[in-house]
Amino acid sequence: MPPKVSAKGAKKAAKTVTKPKDGKKRKAHRKESYSVYIYRVLKQVHPDTGVSSKAMSIMNSFVNDVFERIAAEASRLAHYNKRSTISSREIQTAVRLILPGELAKHATFSMSKLMYESGEKIVQLSIVTC
């Protein structure tokens, strides 16, 4: 049974060392999660609030679930329209279909804003490099 990870342990990478048959030490595989990013957002919103490892695990599962739902719906939309590439349009439509009401509006607004800002940065980079 693997050891339980504390809230502080979620911030740091696991460095468990195993000894294989050939005698060389190897690091264990890293477990990918959104813990660091969830923690950063929490500190931006509520700087004096902490989060337990159980709550972090639940939040991580929630983010993974929403990500998978949006990806699956976007994939379905691309397939319906006979496209092999998922674009921001499919993602936006998938978000509108999956998230309810005001949450979908807020998410699509934030996405549009980020896309616009990243587009500006790309244009600025291309002007600087030319």
Image (spheres, rainbow, N blue to C red):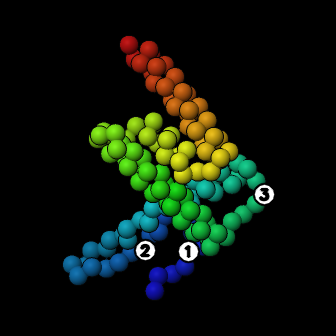
Residue designated by label 2: 16
Residue designated by label 1: 5
Q: Are marks 3 and 2 in contact (CB under 8 Å)?
A: no
Mark 2 and mark 1 lie on one chain; the one further toward the N terminus is: 1
Instruction: Give how far across and how far down residue 123 sits, in percent.
Output: 46, 19
Residue designated by label 3: 48
Query: Which element is circle 3 on?
Result: loop
Q: Residue at x 44, y 16 (%)?
A: 128
Mark 3 and mark 2 lie on one chain; the one further toward the N terminus is: 2
Against 101, residue 16 (above or below) is below
Q: Amino acid at mark 3?
A: Asp
Q: Is residue 110 visible?
A: no
Q: Is residue 38 visible?
A: yes
Left or right: 119, with 80 as reference point? right
Instruction: Give how far across and how far down residue 2 sits, in percent.
Output: 47, 82
The picture quadrant where one finds residue 107 is top right
Q: Nearer the viewer, mark 3 or mark 2?
A: 3
Query: Which element is circle 2 on?
Result: loop
Residues packed near mark 3 inside 10 Å, few (<14), some (14 to 19) or many (20 plus): few
